[in-house]
Image: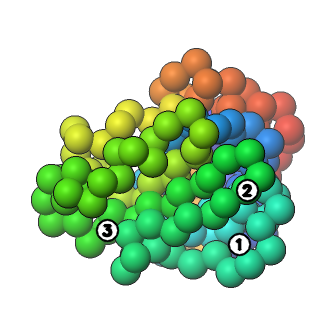
Amino acid sequence: MQLSLPDETATLALGARLAAGVRPGMAVWLVGDLGAGKTTLTRGLLRALGHGGRVKSPTYTLVEIYPFSSFNLYHFDLYRFIDPEEWEEAGFREYFNPESICLVEWPEKGGAILPLPDLEIRLEIDGEGRLARLYGRTEEGRRCVEDISESGSA
């Protein structure tokens, strides 16, 4: 599925549509260059889930944790990883469990050690806006893409 996101509002709206489809136990990879909108998309998702606080990129902390009543959402940023072994050393594997939703920016830095995604969202700069490509990598991920597709345009 491919979507044109002409502005920040559209990227936030896609995040809100994503919120309706993600479920605990899912891993979502957010792929794109610096400034492609990965954190903006995450902000839209978190706002739609009811998080009213600040949403920041976890570039320096590596992970931001957002607790909800029935699950935790973990927002990872692996940009600063030099070696995929850092993933194991940081103990992040345990965060990927049936009670969590995990969003991972820069998943390529985790290499083959990183758990495979249910959903992959590729964001790229397209003039003044963004282009989003969504790939369901598992049955849950494909269901999520269908839910987003059926919810209308971003």
The picture quadrant where one finds residue 52 is bottom right
Residue 67 image position (x, y, % from top left) = 66, 60
Out of 9 and 39, give the one closest to the viewer: 39
Closer to the eye: label 1 or 3: 3
- Give the mark toward the camera: 3 or 2: 2
Quadrant in the picture for residue 66: bottom right
Residue 8, numbered circle? 1
Q: Please tell me which residue is depicted at 86% across the width and 41% down the height of the picture.
A: 152
First-in-chain label (2 vs 1): 1
Tell which of 15 and 133 is nearer to you: 15
Towards the viewer: 90 or 55: 90
Residue positioned 58% across, 18% down in the render: 139
Question: Image check: 140 left or right of 95?
Answer: right
Circles 2, 1 touching at the beta carbon (< 8 Å): no
Mark 1, secondary structure of its residue:
helix
Q: Which amino acid does label 1 sit on?
A: Glu
Return the x and y of residue 95 as percentages of the image width and height.
Answer: 45, 48
Q: Distance between the residues labelled 3 and 2?
A: 26 Å
Query: Which amino acid type corresponds to the residue marked 3 in the rendered image?
Result: Tyr
Q: Earlier in the sequence, mark 1 or mark 3?
A: 1
Quick one: label 3 or label 2, which is nearer the N terminus? 2
Q: Tell whether label 3 touches label 1 (CB within 8 Å).
A: no
Residue displayed at 80% across by 42% down: 20
Image location (x, y in percent) of residue 142: 61, 24
SS of the residue under disc 2? loop
Please state which amino acid type lies under the numbered disc 2. Answer: Phe
**Res. 133 in view:** no
Dot label at residue 68: 2
Q: Distance between the residues labelled 1 and 3?
A: 22 Å
The label shown at residue 79 is 3
Q: Give above or below for 106 relative to 35.
A: above
